[in-house]
Image (cartoon, rainbow, N blue to C red):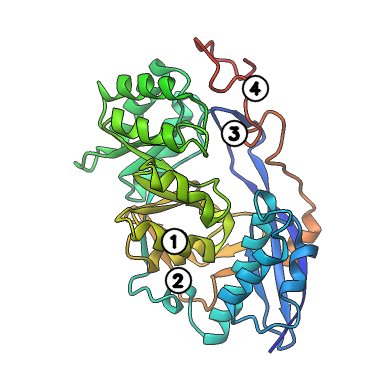
Amino acid sequence: MKITGYRTLRTVHDWGRPVGDVNGFIASGVTDVPIVILETDAGVEGVGMGSHADLDRLFPALEGQDPRATATLYDAMLARVFKSSHGGATFGGIGALDTALWDIKAKLAGEPLWRLLGAADRFVPGYASGLDAALSDGDLATLYARFAERGFTAAKLKGGRNLTADLRRFDILSDLFSAAGTAPALMLDANESWNLKQAVRHVRALEESIDLTWVEEPLRRWDATGHARLSAAIRASVATGENLTGLEQYRPILDAGGADIVQAGAVWGITHFLRVAVTAHGRDLPVSPVGLTANHAVTAAAAAVPNHLSAEVQDLGSPFGLTLDQEFHDGGVVLGDRPGVGIEVDEAAIRHARADGNWQEPAGPHVRSPRAGLRLVDNGSWEQ
């Protein structure tokens, strides 16, 4: 059996609300979802999502190879681009192809990926995370009430610019998620928007009023010393790692003791998540995947690792033209039995719709705010 080619599609996710964080937001709530379909001479195809970046440079590492050799082919893709580095969007291309390889492997085995990877339980604990920075208090309550109805008892807010607003919004979540009689787990995601002293002041002030479970991406992703100093200065755990593109990038922050909860972006693929989980497990640290809404396949990997803590569930819907073999119940994700990663693609519908969306809008969360980490006071504007 050999890999013979690939094709690409691009669909959209309509969130039905503005989505964003401290850096900005996308008012339309419509974002792009790149899809890669890997082809074989046996007619079995694999579906992956992540990025279309550098696929032409990466594919020669796979062409003519047996797709079941997932670990070897992953390393072959890294080797293919080692001179220019596998970082950034290129790593998303690797992640998309890697996920497609795992999809083929599980389909050939006739098993859902969670079972192939060795999980005994199809249930994956999760927390609600609505990319909610631009929502009014009323819309915030409406959104998170839907998660609470599905049994979620943990939630993460986007924030970090205005202490009063963060406290008010946490009160809304606390009321919603305490209805079942359980004290909720509350987290804050600052998306790399603070310097160290801003982070210490803001989190300590929050902790005077709430029991904060973790603070996420408080500082720039490479600031190992700063993360370690922050962790020592606050009660909450420090969670970070979602934007690290490669296992080697974790070494400085883990050696410094800067990550209490090790995160991995789902967009970077299954093999990356599995390797990060093992690395964290070797240090007795929990792992948490970020952004499972479109990258459903990593949920299956989370079910199979011993140190999985909780997975970020950003939305209860799915991208246009994709059917994900999962349900949301009891505060988590219940995976199905469809062989493979559990993604069914309606290519005809996607190609016919020709919808557009762009995470890279200048006002959106994927473009760093020009005054991030440099504000003395907050005036409520994204244009500072």
Residue type marked 2: Gly
Q: Secondary structure at mark 4?
A: loop
Proximity of marks 4 and 1: CB atoms separated by less than 8 Å:
no
Pointer 4 or 3: first along the chain: 3
Q: Quick one: quadrant of the N terminus?
A: bottom right
Marks 4/3: CA distance?
21 Å
Residue type marked 4: Pro
Q: Residue at x 45, y 38 (%)?
A: 224
Q: Quadrant of residue 189?
A: top left
> Mark 2, mark 4: which one is toward the viewer?
4
The crowd level at tag 2 (other Cα within 10 Å; few <14, some 14-19, many 20+) is some
Rendering coords of residue 317 (x, y %): 54, 52
Q: Quadrant of residue 268?
A: bottom right
For residue 327, the mark is 1
Q: Secondary structure at mark 3?
A: loop
Marks 1/2: CA distance?
8 Å
Query: How many numbered marks have been drawn onto this rendered protein structure?
Result: 4
Marks 2/4: CA distance?
43 Å
Rendering coords of residue 332 (x, y %): 37, 56
Question: What residue is pinned by disc 4?
Answer: 370
Residue type marked 1: Glu
Question: What residue is pinned by disc 2?
Answer: 336
| Residue 344 seen in render | no
